[in-house]
Every structure is written in structure tokens, then in C-alpha cells.
Amino acid sequence: MALTVNGEKIDEALVTKEYQRLKPHYDNTFKDQSPQEREKQLSEWSQENVIEMVLLRQYARENGQDVPDAAVKLAFKEMLEQYQGQTPKFSADDEKQIKSDIGLQMKIEKLLQQITSDLAEPSEKDIEDYYQENKEQLKTPESVRVSHIIKHISYQVDEKTALSFVQQAQQQLNDGMIFSSVVAKYSDCPDNDGDLGYIVKGQMVEEFEDVVFKLGTGQTSNIFKTRFGFHIAKVYDKKQEVLQELDQVKDQIAQQITEQLRKDRIDVFVDALKEKAVIERS
């Protein structure tokens, strides 16, 4: 679909890039929708996000505060320093365009600061109310510290061979060899003795979590399979889900409230731009 905003034709690559940026999070959050519903909704959101970005860019270009050349040159220099000795060579025209883009982005940032400059700090009551209304989100989730042995299944190692290898590792454990030694001898991922640290649900593949979150502290699993191969896991510690005290999360809550207020203020500003804009889809 071709998009035009106030006479400016929008490069389809911008919409595609926004679609790709949103897709991983969207697919996970809305996995209960059908693929067709997800595709339709995500395409619409990608277009709307690009339209809003273009409107802000157009407004900042025409009405934004001027940015000193020195600030643009400094930002350009800092960008080049990120290449760490592998600085690309730009033509004069390319450098001019990059600096123009940097200057426009700085104008947009100044504009957003202006729009949100008079936001009030969250009050103690605001923070308390947020805490009471969002206790589930403020809990420290259940976590386990787990180490594992894994043999990957690949074009080089078929399923039967991988299973046989892990069965040998299991026998070594049954014979009394310590887990870290078996990891070093048999695992495809022996770094840190196979220690994955503390993990929470949603961090690993479901087949792995189904096993490790049912183990007790100090327990070792039987052999189990995931999409990556065959595993044996050992749990070294477990931490139960805990609601954090208000004093522990006050700063976090204040920041979240402020960010939401900031977003709401920008949304109102952008909605006003959209009402006046001429947006054509074809």
C-alpha cells in the first residue's frame, strides 16, 4: 500500500522496517490471534507508527527550534567514533545528508521535550495508587538457578547418536561423578560448568522450563528433549515469587508513571497533527 502524508510520499521500506521491529514482540503478546488477524493488525499498526513519525518530522522541520551546527558536528563525530577505527568513507553529499538527518532528529527530540516539559512529578498518592493497582506486575517472579548438559541434534549428529551420548553422561552421574565434571566431558555448552544462572518463566523454551521448574533444589532431571537436542538439568537454587515492598519500587513506579504521562501528552499532540493532515492510502 502506497502512503502519502501531506503530499510527502512515504518510502515503503519505512513501513517494512517498522513491521519487522514490532513483529517479535507482537507475535509473542498476541499469540492467541490467528496468523491472519496478527498480520492485518500488525500491518495497520506499522503504517500508523510511520505516519506519526512522519508527522512529527514534518512539524519539527517547519516549526522546531534551530540546532547549532556545532551540536550537529559533535553528534556526527560521536557517531563515527562508534565504528572503533573502522570509520566508513562518506562522499561529501552523503556526509551532508547524514548531518541533515542528525539535525532533524535533534529538532524532534527538542520538540518532544517542549511538549512534555511541564509534566508534574508523580505525587506520593499517585505512587501508592499505582502500587495497589499493579501488584501482580510488581512481583519478583519465581526463578531457578539451573545448570545443564546438552547434546545438540544437527546434520552432523542424528537423534540416536545425541541420545546415546547423553545416556553416557547420565550413567556417569549415576556412578557418582559430580555434575560440573560431566558437563565438561559431555556437554556441547560447557562454559561456566553449564550454569545458566537464574532464569524466570518465558526466558527459555517451554520444554526446558516444564522440567526445571518442577525440580527441587539440588535435584537432577532425567534425560529430556527440546527443539535444540537432549538435556539433563540440575537445579541449584529456587526463589519463590515475592511482592516487592513499596519502598523498593517507588523510583521505578515514579518513572513508569512519568513515562506514561509523557506518552499520553505526545499522543495528544500527534493526534492533533493527524486531524489536520492529508493522509492518502492507495
Image: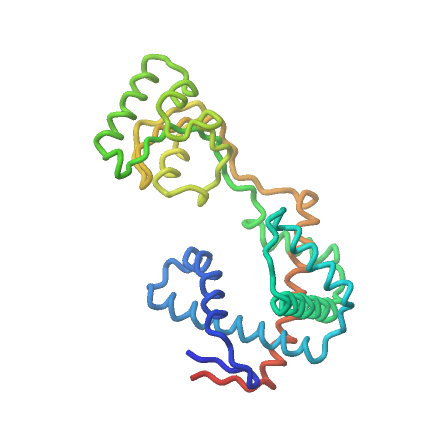
Residue 53 visible in rendering? yes
- The chosen color scheme is rainbow
**Residue 32 location in percent, x, y?**
37, 59
Note whether 45 is above or below 158 in the view shown: below
Horizontally, residue 262 falls left or right of residue 202, namely: right
Residue 154: image x %, image y %? 28, 38
Residue 82 placement, left or right of 186 = right
Question: Could you tell me how many numbered marks the image carries?
Answer: 0
Q: How far across and how far down the image is residue 187, in percent?
A: 37, 27
Given the current orientation, which residue lies at the most extreme left position?
A: 160
**Residue at point 65% right, 56% down?**
79
The residue nearer to you, when weighing 137 against 280, is 280
Image quadrant holding the C terminus, namely bottom left
Residue at x 76% of width, y 73% of height: 66
Inspect this view and state whether residue 264 appears: no
Q: Is residue 124 left or right of residue 27?
A: right
Q: Is residue 114 above or below residue 6?
A: above
Image side of residue 144 versus residue 135, left or right: left
Which of the 4 quarters of the picture holds residue 91?
bottom right
Q: Quadrant of residue 115?
A: bottom right
Front-most of residues 111 and 202: 111
Q: Is residue 277 above or below residue 218?
A: below
Find residue 150 and report its image quarter: top left
Above or below, 13 against 150 in this view is below
- Image location of residue 75, percent across then percent down: 70, 59
Report the front residue among 220 and 159.
Answer: 159
In the picture, the quarter occupied by the N terminus is bottom left
